[in-house]
Image: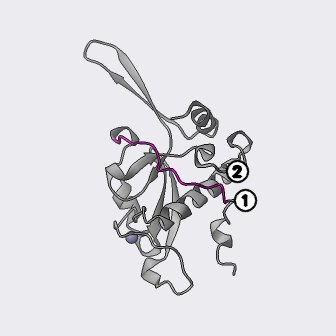
Amino acid sequence: MDDELLRWFDAEGLLRFAAYGDPDGTVVEVTRGPLVALGPHDADYRLAPHPQRMAYRVRLLREMTFEDYQAFMLSWFEHAVRAGEVRCANCDRRILETTPDMVDADTWDAIFIEKELVAWMLCHFDCKKQLPRHLKGRHPFELDPGPAPIYDLSDELHGAARPEEESVG
Ligand SMILES: [Zn+2]
């Protein structure tokens, strides 16, 4: 993970640390930054993206509050959904672009988890109740996340609406 991003997550208290003892007595320390889940399986986890790597121009990372990063993540997920690359973190069904006539079973929400596992994911409204059970026991150090897919977010000029403001229009 990018150094600047790692420092920013550290300042926000979002890094997790683990130490392992090798058989020869060496202690290995591992740092894990926040993740994004593109689906329910271990292999669906990626490292949380750096805004500038996605050409995000609304705000520089060093000027961002946590709320700003949340808004960036929502924009990033919107692009991922448009690309058809996100599945529900619980049921594995593809997350569809929100439309006014969307059936209830397809409606979804962005979720941020901050426990031992720190991760953003998308989940159907109907799946939210099962999600904690699904995530139980998932340990960030057992995952082997690659980099997040790159989307061009340069068209985002004002940041995503907060979830509670999304119904406008
Ligand atoms: Zn679902």
Provide the major secondary structure of the magenta segment: loop
* Disc assigned to residue 32: none
Residues under labels 1 and 2: Cα distance?
7 Å
Task: Kindly indicate the quadrant of the structure image that contains residue 72.
Answer: bottom right
Residue 151 included in the magenta stretch of the image: yes
Q: Secondary structure at mark 2?
A: loop
- Residue at 72% across, 53% down: 58
Q: Residue furthest left?
A: 23
Q: Is mark 1 within 8 Å of ligand 1?
A: no
Earlier residue among tags 1 and 2: 2
**Is residue 148 rendered to the left or right of residue 138?**
right
x and y, in percent, of residue 83 in the image: 47, 64
Classify residue 90 by image quadrant: bottom left
Q: Is residue 143 left or right of residue 160?
A: left
Amino acid found under the numbered disc labelled 2: Arg
Q: Around disc 2, counting alpha carbons within 10 Å, would you say few (fewer than 14), some (14 to 19), or many (20 or more)?
A: some
Left or right: residue 133 versus residue 69 is left
Where is residue 57 drawn, in percent x and y? 70, 50
Tell me which residue sits at (48%, 77%) in the image.
Answer: 107
Q: Are marks 1 and 2 in contact (CB under 8 Å)?
A: yes
In magenta stretch: residue 9: no
Q: Quarter containing ligand 1?
A: bottom left
Q: Report the residue at 38% width, 21% height from top.
A: 28
* Residue located beneath label 2 in the image: 57
Vertical arrangement, residue 103 with respect to residue 18, above or below? below
Residue carrying label 1:
157
Secondary structure found at label 1: loop
Return the residue found at the far bottom: 101
- What segment carries the magenta color? 143-155
